[in-house]
Amino acid sequence: MAQSGNDIADLKAAVKASQSAGDNAWILMSAALVLMMTGPGLALFYSGLVRRRNVLGTMMQSFAMMAVVSLLWAICGYSLVFDQGSPLLGGLHYLFLHGVGAAPNADYAPTIPHTTFMIYQMMFAVITPALIGGAFAERVHFKATLLFSVIWMFLVYFPVAHMVWGKGGFLNAFSGGAIPVFDFAGGTVVHITSGFSALATAIMIGKRRGYPAEPMKPHSLVLSFVGACLLWFGWFGFNAGSALAASSLASSAFVATHLAAAAGAVAWMIAEQVRNGKPSALGAISGAVAGLATVTQGAGFVQPFAAVLIGFIAGFVCYAMVGVVKMKFGYDDSLDAFGVHGVGGLVGCLLTGVFATRLINDGLKTAGGQAAMLGAIDGNPRQILNQAIGAVIGIAFGLIGTFVALKVTGLITPIRIGAQEEAEGMDIALHGEEAYVLED
Amino acid sequence: MFKIEAIIQPSKLGAVREALKAIGVEGITIAEVRGHGRQKGHKEVYRGREYLVDLLPKIRLEMVVTEAHKEDVIEAILGAARTGKIGDGKIFVYRVEGAIRIRNADRGEAAL
């Protein structure tokens, strides 16, 4: 008897170890995929859309986040988001990654090393401030970008990410938050915060000199195309990785992500066909990114054809924002960080309240231990209101945090580059190099 | 000696080179340029923003030929580069005072 008891214990340990190995492999891979979205994905996507004198400066706005935010995350960011702390902000127990090791953190991901969870979440923190840069492209000092981004992380990303994802967070549906918000992969935490912050920066920093009278055509849609395809590819790590296991939920999120991207691309192409008679390559890739940003919030909660609908709506709504509404208001959201990520994030947040279903995600339990109703289609229309409150909080933090972060940055270092530097371009004026050297 | 400078549609470069090769033109220099004559530009739309593009891509060919060869070259280019629509380009003919081959200092027509 004792012998067979030991055998069963050994077997259980072996099953656990092999599940952990599988989950760990997928989440490490996903972490690398999400990093790839910032560099080279977003860096290429954005730098192809600027003029050729600002290519390296634009790439550096993304790449620098891979360096600076990674360190910030290890020093205190991870702790401020994922330590229990208060409902608004995490605590300091994980400062300098203290206590973050091989043993899983059962509150978040019980089958993978805590270290894996930490590095995976780091990549989300890296891309979020990089997204904002699209709104103030071609006109801001590199130093100001860095300083603004660091302050912004403290005022916006850390609190919002903690509220939505951190243990005890005010909006965390899975840890008893007062207002339960479903945000599977960062529709609110990443896209609403960065998108609305982007709008605030575009308005506060002002237009590029000469906008909109002078032509400011994308200098290389080839770069943007490659970047967008890398974003699509990396997004599987972003959304399917957010299952935090190599599980059927990851597969479900993977499918939802892909279908929404496809539907977004089709919708944008249709909109352009109707309006201009020509579906453009830039339009198709913009639509895919809009679909991806919009499905992020619900990726692990919605059924495949809800994702298709979400992607379609994203394509049309984001097209209308960047192609019509932006012109009417006249702000210079240069690369449409707000029009795609802010608007897409908001639409996706609300639609998650409609389409989230326990048929896909049974992680939330009722008092009786059964899968709780999630969105309106499960019979819980109140969730739309919860999602809206979450969105409003994300928007408020984004707008107010950006206002404060820009004001503080401006007291320490100049934000806008001078007229001469803007004419010469960021590459030479700020970085002392050129993207394209034509002579040997 | 005459210099023939032709500005043509980029899509006609292959046909023009074939035609020139057929009549024995050996030296040629080309450049990708932008410009317009009477041709109107076209509209481009990027995320709903319209741009009128009137500096269009063209190819500029330059070659220096003997007087005996001049009309043949012009005919060859006319024959190969013409579509009959606005935007086909132009041919300019200049008198050339001298030509020197750098490798061996040959002068005049011997340098062509």
Image: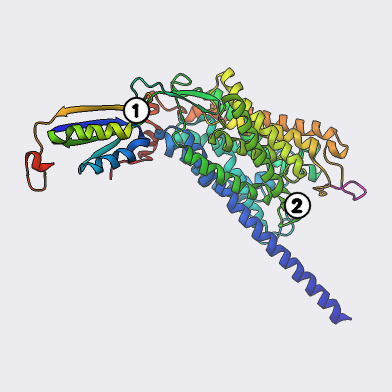
Residue B52 position by quadrant: top left
Tag 1 secondary structure: loop
The segment highlighted magenta reads A364-371
Asked whether A368 falls inside the magenta stretch, the response is yes
Measured as percent of width and height from the top left, residue A186 is found at 68, 41
Tag 2 secondary structure: helix
User: Is the Cβ of the residue at disc 2 closer than 8 Å to that at disc 1?
Assistant: no
Q: Residue at x 72, y 67 (%)?
A: A17
Res A101 visible = no
Which is more toward the observer, B85 or A93? Answer: B85
Which kind of residue does numbered mark 1 sit on? Asp
Q: Quadrant of the C terminus of chain A?
A: top left
Which kind of residue does numbered mark 2 sit on? Leu
Q: Residue at x 51, y 37 (%)?
A: A46
Label 2 marks which chain's residue? A
Give left or right: position of A269 versus A352: left
Label 1 marks which chain's residue? B
Q: Quadrant of the N terminus of chain A?
A: bottom right
Q: Residue at x 62, y 37 (%)?
A: A265
Measured as percent of width and height from the top left, residue B61 is found at 26, 35
- Mark 2 and mark 1: Cα distance apart in space: 60 Å
- Label 1, residues with CA under 10 Å away: few <14, some 14-19, many ≥20: some
Measured as percent of width and height from the top left, residue A95 is found at 62, 49
Where does label 2 land, which residue? A249
